[in-house]
Amino acid sequence: MNSKNHPETTQHAPAPPTWWPSRILGPMPGLVELNLACSGLFIGFAVVPLLYPLWLHLHAGQGWSYLLPCDFIYFYGVGRIAHEYPLTRLYEYSLVLKTTDDIFPLKGAMWGPSPYPPFVALFFSLFARLPFLPSYVLWMATSVALYLGGIAAAVRGACPRQPLKSSLVFCVALGFYPFFICDLKNGQLSAVAVFAVGLAIALDRDERLFLSGLALAILCYKPTLLLLLFPMLLLTRRFRTLAGFLTGGAALFLLTTAIGGIEIWRIYFLHALGFLHGFIEVQGQSTLQLWEYVDFHTFSYAVSGGRTTAGLILIGAISLAAAALLAVLLWRSAKSAKPAQQLAWAATITWTLLLNFYVPVWDSILVVLAFILTLRALNDLGWHRAARWIGLIAFLIFAVTWNLTAGDHHHGNQLMMALLFLLGSSQLLLLHRTSQSQLPADRPPSFTE
């Protein structure tokens, strides 16, 4: 072959971005510098403030007032009940109060009921076999492993042979306030959801659909998180995934029944109804910490005029329109290319957080997966301008969540809800554009901007 007739394409280094103020800040930092900066900020402003009080408690018996992991105290308590009593006593409120007060009595407050199904208590009965402090440290390590495992499953293949990009994703994700403070420090369960959804997405990408459904069945620990994911399986005709999900859910039901008897489900059902009624009544009296929730339903209580007739009509109309549009786009995406499949998962995750009636801020860590999937799809499509827009929203959400530490808490969740709405709307638009390509699923479209 004559090289003159087929000259090689010369590869040039990309020009530095025009928006970077190089005259003021010098050359734009690379991935190494960004990784070092993020790691330093994470260790200095997050890890040390969390671990130092723990060290004080271990060595001097101090520090619990700062570190108090309220949620884990509850989970450890119900685990102790499941370990020491018949499972049918799990929802006896007096027993729950006695057990949790034995672990750490609250002053001027009291432990509330919880809507978690009985197999959650069975899981934590394994931790209740240890003393409280080692159990708490073990659960923190487990949470980090589950969280990073779910993110790694979603990232896999997105940054091949680019470890610096992958490590930057992990570092930023670890420093996300809803995870590090609300989930890890307080001992919540949301890392389990990230692991389940991330694993389900990875298995779906590998076309191991039944196993993907089994992974999604883990979300039965909090059924509200399945509000849109379950319909998505139907609308995208993932019937093998649906079969795996039903199999996993049935296994959890049968295992719990074998241990606690069928009566435990009647008790749990009545308890869950009572919790829902109490949740609505408490919200009506504005005594809940409304800043902890990011869904439309709670947002209507948190803003002035949100519970008026006009406010409810507006929120209802937006919710119905978004749900209907998402359903249509999910149906169309079933046979579309892989970028459309990734955007379908991402949009479903984001709108699950918005269209729900009970989404505390710690469950919003699922949005990390939505960002990863959206950016990966846009990178595959070559839509770089859209990727920069999504990246800006990600940065703003990361920054806004740390406003939840402010003293008044007036605007943290409202700003985050608005940004989630912006993200979800952008994902619907991108999914619409991608689904219109009408290309086969094994050949992604090639658009440029």
Image (tube, rainbow, N blue to C red):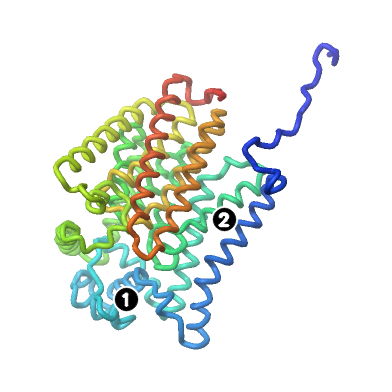
Q: 76 and 250: which one is in front?
A: 76
Q: Earlier in the sequence, mark 1 or mark 2?
A: 1
Residue identifier under label 1: 80
Q: 371 and 130: which one is in front?
A: 371
Q: Amino acid at mark 1?
A: Arg
Callout 2 environment at 10 Å: few (<14), some (14 to 19), or many (20+)?
Answer: some
Location of residue 246 in the rendering, given as x and y in whole percent from the top left corner? 30, 45
Location of residue 307 in the rendering, given as x and y in whole percent from the top left corner? 18, 48
Residue identifier under label 2: 171
> Secondary structure beneath disc 2?
helix
Give the label on residue 250, or none.
none
Question: Going 26% across and 53% down the picture, which residue do you hit?
Answer: 302
Viewed as shown, does residue 428 lie left or right of 320? right
Of circles 1 and 2, which is in front? 2
Residue 202 visible to an observer of this rendering: no
Residue 207 visible to an observer of this rendering: yes
Question: Going 18% across and 77% down the picture, which residue do you hit?
Answer: 94
